Image: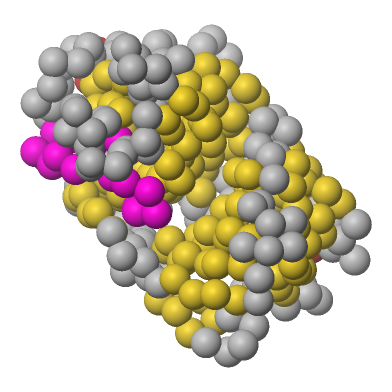
């Protein structure tokens, strides 16, 4: 029997969008290198509403990984990239490692009349993840957009491999084009009918399952929308797979990966392996240091809050 924890979200509102935050979560560490996990939405916008508006903000030592379920978002960054991300597409922005690097960007909803595609929804549902970078590697800033990803039907479900390498229960091998700096996996699973799905597990990985629509049952436990099933390699040591049951319309994000060798500290929009690097990055951003570049946007610049007293480094 597997040991599965069910994590509850912290609910918030960011720019008028309901957010369910599953990572970080009450002392629970990252899942592999996945260190931050939000489900934004679902939200519907009136004709006079702007939708999601996230002003200029920085990142260090991480990748932002945006997976769109519905709606469209315009990404602009300090490398000069402008990209509309639409449903079933992935954006990966890499901030680079170390104190000489960093990146800044904006994110805003777009509709048919504001730069989106003709059938862009006046709504939003997206999974926003951060991937902590291995800080013993010298990693450069970059931006990648992935409009086409491996997609297949397995039993009563459609699978989309958003990152990593995966061998299905039928023995088919799939490889996503998505850039990686540590071993990890991401699969979007959408149930097209009431059915069971079996997901294969890799030795040495930690795993989580976020339900974005509906609910799933596994190992006698139920995971509702915006909850996170979490299980560790030691829980799955004698299990090569996990079986999930769900009704038609249920959708989930399955993530996993090998733990990093370095500590992962998070504060605001920063990730680092030590407190000093977080402190320096706060100072640099708030003083307009050139390492974060400029974004071609009229959106407001968001100042970084100071580290709280007693922040554990």
Q: Which residues make up the magenta segment? A: 73-90
- Nearest the eye: 55 or 33: 55
From the top left corner, tell me how far across and down residue 234 is, in percent: 76, 64
Is 81 colored magenta in this rendering?
yes
Question: Relative to 301, does residue 263 appear above or below in the rendering?
Answer: below
> Could you tell me how many numbered marks the image carries?
0
- Quarter of the figure with residue 202: bottom right
| Left or right of 231 in this view: 280 | left
Say whether residue 64 is visible: yes
Is 123 colored magenta in this rendering?
no
| Residue in the image at 51% along x and 49% along y | 34
- Nearest the eye: 66 or 164: 66
| Residue in the image at 90% along x and 66% along y | 1
| Residue in the image at 58% along x and 60% along y | 189
Question: Relative to 304, does residue 252 appear above or below in the rendering?
Answer: below
Question: Relative to 149, does residue 239 appear above or below in the rendering?
Answer: below
| Left or right of 125 in this view: 139 | left
From the top left corner, tell me how far across and down residue 45 is, in percent: 41, 21
- Nearest the eye: 120 or 158: 120
From the top left corner, tell me how far across and down residue 226 is, in percent: 66, 37
- Quarter of the figure with residue 82: top left
């Amino acid at each position: 029997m597997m040991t599965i924890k069910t994590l509850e979200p912290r609910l918030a509102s960011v720019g008028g969008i309901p957010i369910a935050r599953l990572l970080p979560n009450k002392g629970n560490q990252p899942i592999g290198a996945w260190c931050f996990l939000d489900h934004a939405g679902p939200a519907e916008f009136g004709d006079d509403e702007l939708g999601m508006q996230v002003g200029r903000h920085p990142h260090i030592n991480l990748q932002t990984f945006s997976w769109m379920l519905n709606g469209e978002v315009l990404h602009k960054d300090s490398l000069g990239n402008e990209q509309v991300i639409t449903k079933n597409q992935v954006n990966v922005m890499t901030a680079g490692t170390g104190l000489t690097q960093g990146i800044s960007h904006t994110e805003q909803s777009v509709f048919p009349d504001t730069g989106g595609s003709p059938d862009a929804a006046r709504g939003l549902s997206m999974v926003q993840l951060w991937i902590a970078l291995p800080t013993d590697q010298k990693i450069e800033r970059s931006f990648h957009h992935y409009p086409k990803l491996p997609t297949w039907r397995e039993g009563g479900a459609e699978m989309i491999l958003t990152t990593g390498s995966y061998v299905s229960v039928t023995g088919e091998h799939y490889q996503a084009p998505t850039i990686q700096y540590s071993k990890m996996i991401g699969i979007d699973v959408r149930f097209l009918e009431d059915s069971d799905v079996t997901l294969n597990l890799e030795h040495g990985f930690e795993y989580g399952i976020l339900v974005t629509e509906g609910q799933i049952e596994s190992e006698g436990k139920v995971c509702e929308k915006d909850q996170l099933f979490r299980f560790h390699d030691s829980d799955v040591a004698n299990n090569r797979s996990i079986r999930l049951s769900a009704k038609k319309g249920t959708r989930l994000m399955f993530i996993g990966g090998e733990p990093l060798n370095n500590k992962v500290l998070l504060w605001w929009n920063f990730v680092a392996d030590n407190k000093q690097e977080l402190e320096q990055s706060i100072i640099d951003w708030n003083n307009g240091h050139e390492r974060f570049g400029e974004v071609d946007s009229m959106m407001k610049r968001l100042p970084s809050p100071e580290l709280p007293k007693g922040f554990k480094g």
